[in-house]
Image: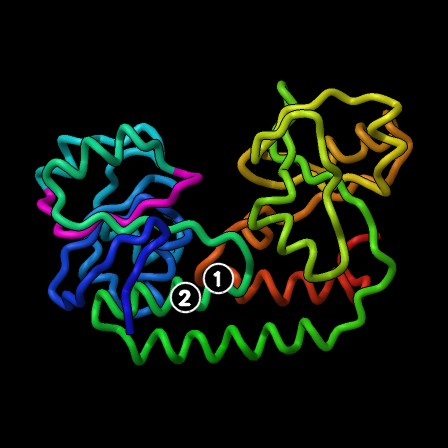
Amino acid sequence: MTLTDAVGARHIPDPAARIVSLVPSITELLCDLGLAAQVVGRTGFCIHPAETVKQIAKVGGTKDVNIDKIRRLAPTHLVVNIDENEKPTVEALAEFVPHIIVTHPLAPRDNLDLARLLGGIFGANAAADAWCAQFEAEYAALQATPKGVPQTMLYCIWQDPWMAVSRETYIARMMAEIGWSVPQLDDAARYPRFEWSDQLVARIDGVLLSTEPYRFTEVHADALERQIGKPVHLVDGELMSWYGSRSLAGLRYLRQIADGNLLT
């Protein structure tokens, strides 16, 4: 098996690796693959599994990284993500961390390659295979679920300014699994800014407000629904956007939505 990351860098197995993870969802996956003892550093946003990560040193946020602290931890491997971590920071860390593993899952089934990549590099192939079997079972169950009427849903991740997701994101491809699409906005960014307008509202069937990274609540949803006159639903941001371990629950969450058990 060729262990190649998202930027084409090849890696060799190193079961004795010392790992710093700057990606919350991947920190959780590393722990679930039985590698927690090798994870020597993580961000403050790496909160799952809670009891396990308490024992792992914090090295700042996903973007405001404490480079000196990471240097003192002497990691052999750094796990980063193209969307979540800033390139200048990663380049600075690459000056003293021998191996940089770049990740960029863009669709639910990319989780299979992610798990096998990490399992292969860090000597957890059996655990990765077992995890992939769980994923395949959850994915098959989702595929067997009737999808209902296709809808165009604006998925919002921030306000002041308002920001949404584009069609090129993991979130949009999660939504596509149940027949939902996101509207193409004027801003071509992966996470475009937008302004509310009658024209935009006319193009959508409803709005999804994510509980992260902005902490939207039912209060926000009720107020926006009154403003635009279209259905507005609060959705679990972790289950819609976290790849890795949380994607298993994410697929079950999509199945519940498709069954009509979550959004009313």
- Residue 255 image offset from top left, x and y in percent: 70, 67
- Residue 13 image offset from top left, x and y in percent: 17, 67
Magenta run includes residue 79: yes
Residue 35 against residue 85 in the figure, above or below: below
Mark 2: amino acid: Asp
Mark 1 residue crowding within 10 angstroms, few (<14) / some (14–19) / many (20+): some
Residue under the image location 18 percent in, 36 percent down: 93
Residue under the image location 55 percent in, 57 percent down: 107
**Circle number at residue 75:** none
Q: Residue 22 falls in which quadrant of the image?
A: top left
Residue 211 against residue 240 in the figure, above or below: above
Does residue 65 appear left or right of residue 144 in this picture? left
Quadrant containing the N terminus is: bottom left
Q: Nearer the viewer, residue 176 or 242?
A: 176
- Residue 234 image offset from top left, x and y in percent: 71, 43
In the picture of the structure, the residue carrying the numbered disc 1 is 110
Residue under the image location 8 percent in, 39 percent down: 72
Asked which secondary structure carries label 1, the reply is helix
Q: Residue 44 falls in which quadrant of the image?
A: top left
Mark 1: amino acid: Asp
In the picture of the structure, the residue carrying the numbered disc 2 is 113
Q: Which residues are magenta?
A: 73-84
Q: Nearer the viewer, residue 252 or 53?
A: 252
Mark 2 residue crowding within 10 angstroms, few (<14) / some (14–19) / many (20+): some
Residue under the image location 35 percent in, 74 percent down: 128
